[in-house]
Image (spheres, rainbow, N blue to C red):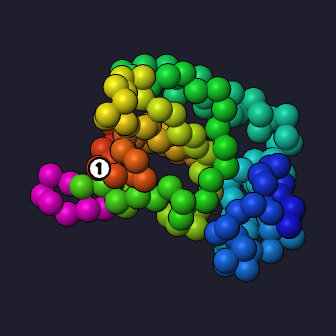
Amino acid sequence: MESICGADCDNCGYGKNCNCKGCKNTKGCPFGKQCFVAKYILTGGKENYEIFKKQLVAEINELNVPGMPKINDLNPLNGSFVNISYPLPNGKEVKFLDDNDIYLGNQVECEFNDGDHIRCFGILANMNFIMVSEYGPNGDNPELIIYKKR
């Protein structure tokens, strides 16, 4: 399988299990919906996409989330990998993402970890929002830190 953005489709367990035909073969719709990354590259070129990513990384770093180290890059991620449930004050849990969308994201370890208490930050974004969450090993005890419209 080939991607438009350079993602490593051959090592994507989700795609293999769902008979994904790859981004290039589906003209940017590997999971039935138009991938915003592929659309960006197909309409504006790879160079403009890289400029967009750098701008997005700068916006995320400017949030100055306590304990979150600066990030250097964002990677295309399928929603099914990153769409975790967040607890609400009323006791219900909710997912904010679409399993079939592609997001740009990264995971970094919290700078305040002490060895016994390990937390990570999950950063996700697309053209419309930036989301930062904090969670433990395997996504345990997630907490939504920032959801910001762009």
Position above or below: 112 against 135: above
Residue drawn where x is 64% and y is 69% of the image: 14
Q: Is residue 150 visible?
A: no
Q: Position of residue 74 (x, y in %)?
A: 64, 38
Residue drawn where x is 32% and y is 48% of the image: 142
Q: Position of residue 101 (x, y in %)?
A: 59, 62
The part of the chain drawn in magenta is: 88-94
Quadrant of the rendering where the N terminus is positioned: bottom right
Dominant secondary structure of the residues highlighted in magenta in the image:
loop
How many marks overall? 1
Residue 54 in magenta? no
Circle 1 sits on which residue? 141
Q: Is residue 95 visible?
A: yes
Badge 1 amino acid? Asn
Residue drawn where x is 52% and y is 28% of the image: 60
Residue 90 in magenta? yes
Q: Position of residue 131 (x, y in %)?
A: 44, 41
Residue 9: which quarter of the image?
bottom right
Q: Residue furthest front?
A: 116
Position above or below: 71 against 132: above
* 127 relative position to 135: left or right: right
Position above or below: 21 against 149: below
Q: Position of residue 81 (x, y in %)?
A: 54, 60
